Image: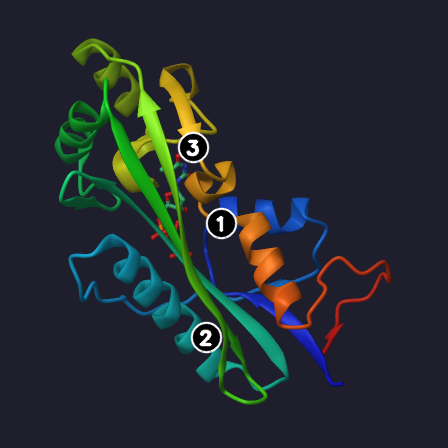
Protein backbone atom coordinates (compact mmCIF):
# COMPACT_ATOMS: atom_id res chain seq x y z
CA UNK A 1 0.00 0.00 0.00
CA UNK A 2 1.35 3.39 -0.93
CA UNK A 3 -0.16 6.85 -0.64
CA UNK A 4 -0.91 8.86 -3.72
CA UNK A 5 -2.40 12.24 -4.36
CA UNK A 6 -5.08 12.75 -6.99
CA UNK A 7 -4.12 15.33 -9.64
CA UNK A 8 -6.57 16.63 -12.23
CA UNK A 9 -4.65 17.57 -15.39
CA UNK A 10 -7.31 20.01 -16.60
CA UNK A 11 -8.11 23.69 -16.77
CA UNK A 12 -11.82 22.95 -17.17
CA UNK A 13 -13.93 24.34 -14.31
CA UNK A 14 -16.61 21.73 -15.18
CA UNK A 15 -14.25 18.82 -14.54
CA UNK A 16 -13.13 20.39 -11.28
CA UNK A 17 -16.73 20.80 -10.18
CA UNK A 18 -17.69 17.21 -11.00
CA UNK A 19 -14.75 15.77 -9.03
CA UNK A 20 -15.52 18.10 -6.12
CA UNK A 21 -19.21 17.15 -6.24
CA UNK A 22 -18.17 13.50 -5.93
CA UNK A 23 -16.47 14.45 -2.67
CA UNK A 24 -12.94 13.80 -3.92
CA UNK A 25 -9.87 15.62 -2.71
CA UNK A 26 -7.49 16.56 -5.50
CA UNK A 27 -5.05 19.11 -6.85
CA UNK A 28 -5.38 20.83 -10.22
CA UNK A 29 -2.40 21.02 -12.56
CA UNK A 30 -3.53 21.80 -16.13
CA UNK A 31 -1.65 20.37 -19.09
CA UNK A 32 -0.10 23.22 -21.03
CA UNK A 33 0.93 21.58 -24.30
CA UNK A 34 -1.12 21.55 -27.47
CA UNK A 35 -2.50 18.06 -27.83
CA UNK A 36 -2.58 16.52 -31.29
CA UNK A 37 -5.68 14.93 -32.79
CA UNK A 38 -4.26 11.81 -34.44
CA UNK A 39 -7.34 9.96 -35.59
CA UNK A 40 -10.75 10.58 -37.18
CA UNK A 41 -12.41 8.07 -34.85
CA UNK A 42 -14.00 10.01 -31.95
CA UNK A 43 -13.53 7.25 -29.36
CA UNK A 44 -9.85 6.84 -30.21
CA UNK A 45 -9.47 10.64 -30.42
CA UNK A 46 -10.72 11.39 -26.88
CA UNK A 47 -8.75 8.47 -25.44
CA UNK A 48 -5.58 9.69 -27.12
CA UNK A 49 -6.10 13.37 -26.17
CA UNK A 50 -6.88 12.39 -22.54
CA UNK A 51 -3.71 10.31 -22.44
CA UNK A 52 -1.58 13.11 -23.89
CA UNK A 53 -2.83 15.51 -21.17
CA UNK A 54 -2.28 12.98 -18.35
CA UNK A 55 1.18 12.05 -19.67
CA UNK A 56 2.32 15.67 -19.91
CA UNK A 57 1.37 16.43 -16.30
CA UNK A 58 2.59 13.05 -14.97
CA UNK A 59 6.02 13.77 -16.49
CA UNK A 60 6.17 17.04 -14.50
CA UNK A 61 4.94 15.50 -11.22
CA UNK A 62 7.60 14.57 -8.71
CA UNK A 63 5.39 12.98 -6.04
CA UNK A 64 3.36 9.76 -5.90
CA UNK A 65 0.12 10.61 -7.63
CA UNK A 66 -2.70 9.43 -9.84
CA UNK A 67 -2.88 11.94 -12.70
CA UNK A 68 -6.22 12.29 -14.49
CA UNK A 69 -6.42 13.56 -18.08
CA UNK A 70 -9.71 14.00 -19.91
CA UNK A 71 -11.06 15.22 -23.23
CA UNK A 72 -14.52 15.75 -24.75
CA UNK A 73 -15.67 15.90 -28.38
CA UNK A 74 -19.02 15.89 -30.14
CA UNK A 75 -19.51 13.47 -33.02
CA UNK A 76 -22.19 14.29 -35.58
CA UNK A 77 -22.37 11.87 -38.50
CA UNK A 78 -18.76 11.39 -39.54
CA UNK A 79 -17.67 14.77 -38.21
CA UNK A 80 -15.78 15.44 -34.98
CA UNK A 81 -16.67 18.80 -33.40
CA UNK A 82 -14.28 20.23 -30.85
CA UNK A 83 -14.44 23.78 -29.51
CA UNK A 84 -15.52 26.36 -32.12
CA UNK A 85 -12.75 28.49 -33.65
CA UNK A 86 -14.96 31.59 -33.84
CA UNK A 87 -18.61 32.67 -33.82
CA UNK A 88 -19.28 31.51 -37.39
CA UNK A 89 -17.84 28.12 -36.57
CA UNK A 90 -20.11 27.97 -33.50
CA UNK A 91 -23.09 28.88 -35.71
CA UNK A 92 -22.25 26.07 -38.17
CA UNK A 93 -21.95 23.58 -35.31
CA UNK A 94 -25.28 24.48 -33.70
CA UNK A 95 -27.01 24.51 -37.12
CA UNK A 96 -25.76 20.97 -37.60
CA UNK A 97 -26.76 19.73 -34.13
CA UNK A 98 -30.21 21.33 -33.74
CA UNK A 99 -33.29 19.19 -34.42
CA UNK A 100 -31.20 16.01 -34.52
CA UNK A 101 -29.18 13.52 -32.44
CA UNK A 102 -25.44 13.32 -31.92
CA UNK A 103 -22.94 11.61 -29.65
CA UNK A 104 -20.74 13.22 -27.01
CA UNK A 105 -17.59 11.27 -26.11
CA UNK A 106 -15.35 11.89 -23.13
CA UNK A 107 -12.08 10.05 -22.73
CA UNK A 108 -10.29 9.56 -19.42
CA UNK A 109 -6.72 8.44 -18.74
CA UNK A 110 -5.25 7.90 -15.28
CA UNK A 111 -1.49 7.52 -14.93
CA UNK A 112 0.18 6.25 -11.77
CA UNK A 113 3.39 8.28 -11.34
CA UNK A 114 4.89 5.58 -9.08
CA UNK A 115 4.95 2.94 -11.83
CA UNK A 116 4.54 5.27 -14.82
CA UNK A 117 1.77 2.90 -15.90
CA UNK A 118 -1.67 3.62 -17.29
CA UNK A 119 -4.09 2.56 -14.54
CA UNK A 120 -7.35 3.43 -16.30
CA UNK A 121 -8.07 4.35 -19.94
CA UNK A 122 -11.54 4.50 -21.43
CA UNK A 123 -14.04 6.57 -23.41
CA UNK A 124 -17.69 6.93 -22.49
CA UNK A 125 -20.37 8.03 -24.97
CA UNK A 126 -23.75 9.70 -24.42
CA UNK A 127 -26.38 10.25 -27.12
CA UNK A 128 -27.98 13.71 -27.08
CA UNK A 129 -31.13 14.68 -29.02
CA UNK A 130 -32.00 18.33 -29.53
CA UNK A 131 -35.17 20.24 -30.39
CA UNK A 132 -35.01 22.47 -33.50
CA UNK A 133 -33.48 25.96 -33.03
CA UNK A 134 -34.15 29.11 -35.03
CA UNK A 135 -31.18 31.00 -36.51
CA UNK A 136 -32.11 33.95 -34.30
CA UNK A 137 -31.94 31.84 -31.16
CA UNK A 138 -28.58 30.36 -32.20
CA UNK A 139 -27.17 33.86 -32.81
CA UNK A 140 -28.38 35.15 -29.46
CA UNK A 141 -26.99 32.07 -27.67
CA UNK A 142 -23.60 32.59 -29.33
CA UNK A 143 -23.81 36.23 -28.23
CA UNK A 144 -23.72 35.08 -24.59
CA UNK A 145 -20.20 33.74 -25.20
CA UNK A 146 -21.02 30.44 -23.52
CA UNK A 147 -20.55 28.21 -26.59
CA UNK A 148 -17.02 29.37 -27.32
CA UNK A 149 -15.13 27.05 -24.95
CA UNK A 150 -17.45 24.05 -25.27
CA UNK A 151 -17.13 21.06 -27.58
CA UNK A 152 -19.95 21.26 -30.16
CA UNK A 153 -20.57 24.92 -29.14
CA UNK A 154 -23.15 24.23 -26.45
CA UNK A 155 -23.49 23.60 -22.73
CA UNK A 156 -26.11 21.05 -21.69
CA UNK A 157 -25.77 22.42 -18.16
CA UNK A 158 -26.25 26.04 -19.31
CA UNK A 159 -28.15 28.05 -21.89
CA UNK A 160 -28.74 25.08 -24.21
CA UNK A 161 -30.75 23.24 -21.56
CA UNK A 162 -34.18 24.22 -23.01
CA UNK A 163 -33.26 22.52 -26.29
CA UNK A 164 -32.20 19.14 -24.89
CA UNK A 165 -34.94 16.66 -25.85
CA UNK A 166 -33.38 13.47 -24.53
CA UNK A 167 -30.11 11.93 -23.47
CA UNK A 168 -29.04 8.31 -23.34
CA UNK A 169 -26.00 7.63 -21.18
CA UNK A 170 -24.23 9.39 -18.34
CA UNK A 171 -25.11 13.09 -18.07
CA UNK A 172 -21.64 13.98 -16.74
CA UNK A 173 -20.04 12.57 -19.91
CA UNK A 174 -21.63 15.49 -21.78
CA UNK A 175 -20.47 18.06 -19.22
CA UNK A 176 -16.90 16.78 -19.61
CA UNK A 177 -16.18 14.03 -17.09
CA UNK A 178 -17.98 10.65 -16.79
CA UNK A 179 -18.11 10.58 -13.01
CA UNK A 180 -19.66 7.18 -12.30
CA UNK A 181 -17.67 5.27 -14.95
CA UNK A 182 -14.46 6.86 -13.62
CA UNK A 183 -15.29 5.90 -10.05
CA UNK A 184 -16.24 2.33 -11.02
CA UNK A 185 -13.09 1.82 -13.14
CA UNK A 186 -10.87 2.86 -10.23
CA UNK A 187 -12.84 0.63 -7.87
CA UNK A 188 -12.04 -2.30 -10.19
CA UNK A 189 -8.35 -1.40 -9.84
CA UNK A 190 -8.59 -1.46 -6.03
CA UNK A 191 -8.83 2.29 -5.46
CA UNK A 192 -11.90 3.49 -3.52
CA UNK A 193 -12.07 7.25 -3.99
CA UNK A 194 -15.02 7.72 -1.65
CA UNK A 195 -13.39 6.75 1.59
CA UNK A 196 -14.60 8.56 4.70
CA UNK A 197 -11.30 9.96 6.03
CA UNK A 198 -10.74 13.67 5.62
CA UNK A 199 -7.29 13.49 4.11
CA UNK A 200 -5.89 14.15 0.68
CA UNK A 201 -4.07 10.87 0.05
CA UNK A 202 -5.51 7.72 -1.45
CA UNK A 203 -3.98 4.35 -0.68
CA UNK A 204 -3.81 1.30 -2.89
C1 LIG B 1 -21.01 19.25 -25.06
C2 LIG B 1 -20.52 19.99 -23.85
C3 LIG B 1 -19.16 20.25 -23.63
N1 LIG B 1 -18.74 20.93 -22.53
C4 LIG B 1 -17.30 21.22 -22.30
C5 LIG B 1 -16.56 20.13 -21.54
C6 LIG B 1 -15.11 20.49 -21.83
O1 LIG B 1 -14.64 21.35 -20.79
C7 LIG B 1 -15.17 21.26 -23.15
C8 LIG B 1 -14.41 20.54 -24.22
O2 LIG B 1 -13.06 20.89 -24.15
P1 LIG B 1 -11.86 19.93 -23.75
O3 LIG B 1 -10.77 20.18 -24.73
O4 LIG B 1 -12.32 18.52 -23.56
O5 LIG B 1 -11.40 20.42 -22.30
P2 LIG B 1 -10.96 21.86 -21.77
O6 LIG B 1 -10.10 22.55 -22.79
O7 LIG B 1 -12.19 22.59 -21.29
O8 LIG B 1 -10.09 21.54 -20.49
P3 LIG B 1 -8.67 20.74 -20.40
O9 LIG B 1 -8.18 20.44 -21.78
O10 LIG B 1 -7.74 21.61 -19.64
O11 LIG B 1 -9.01 19.48 -19.62
O12 LIG B 1 -16.55 21.37 -23.49
C9 LIG B 1 -19.67 21.38 -21.58
O13 LIG B 1 -19.29 22.00 -20.58
N2 LIG B 1 -21.00 21.13 -21.78
C10 LIG B 1 -21.48 20.46 -22.86
O14 LIG B 1 -22.70 20.26 -22.98
Residue that badge 1 annotates: 177
Q: Position of residue 139 (x, y in %)?
A: 21, 18
Q: Is residue 45 visible?
A: yes
Establish whether ligand 1 lies closer than 8 Å to the Cβ of label 1.
yes
Question: Mark 2 or 3 closer to N-term?
Answer: 2
Q: Is residue 148 visible?
A: no
Q: Are marks 2 and 3 in contact (CB under 8 Å)?
A: no
Q: Nearer the viewer, mark 2 or mark 1?
A: 1
- Residue marked by disc 3: 168
What residue appears at the point 50 percent right and 49 percent down from the top-left corner? 178
Element assignment for label 2 = helix
Question: In the shown orientation, is residue 82 left or right of residue 128?
Answer: left
What residue occupies the far right of the structure in this picture? 197
Q: Residue 26 lies in what quarter of the image?
A: bottom right
Task: Judge left or right: residue 18 versus residue 111.
Answer: right
165 vs 183: above or below: above
Q: Quadrant of the C terminus?
A: bottom right
Q: Earlier in the sequence, mark 1 or mark 3?
A: 3
Say which quarter of the image contains residue 69: bottom left
Q: Which residue is mark 2?
A: 57
Q: CA distance from mark 1 to mark 3?
A: 15 Å
Q: Earlier in the sequence, mark 2 or mark 1?
A: 2
Q: Residues within 10 Å of mark 1 (few under 14, many from 20)?
A: many
The quarter of the picture where residue 132 lies is: top left
Amino acid sequence: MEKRRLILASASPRRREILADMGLRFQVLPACGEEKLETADPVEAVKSLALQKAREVADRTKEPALVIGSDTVVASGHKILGKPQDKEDAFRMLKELQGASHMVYTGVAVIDTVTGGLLVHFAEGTKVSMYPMTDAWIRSYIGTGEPMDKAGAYAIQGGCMPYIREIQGEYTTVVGFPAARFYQELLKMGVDLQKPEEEEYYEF
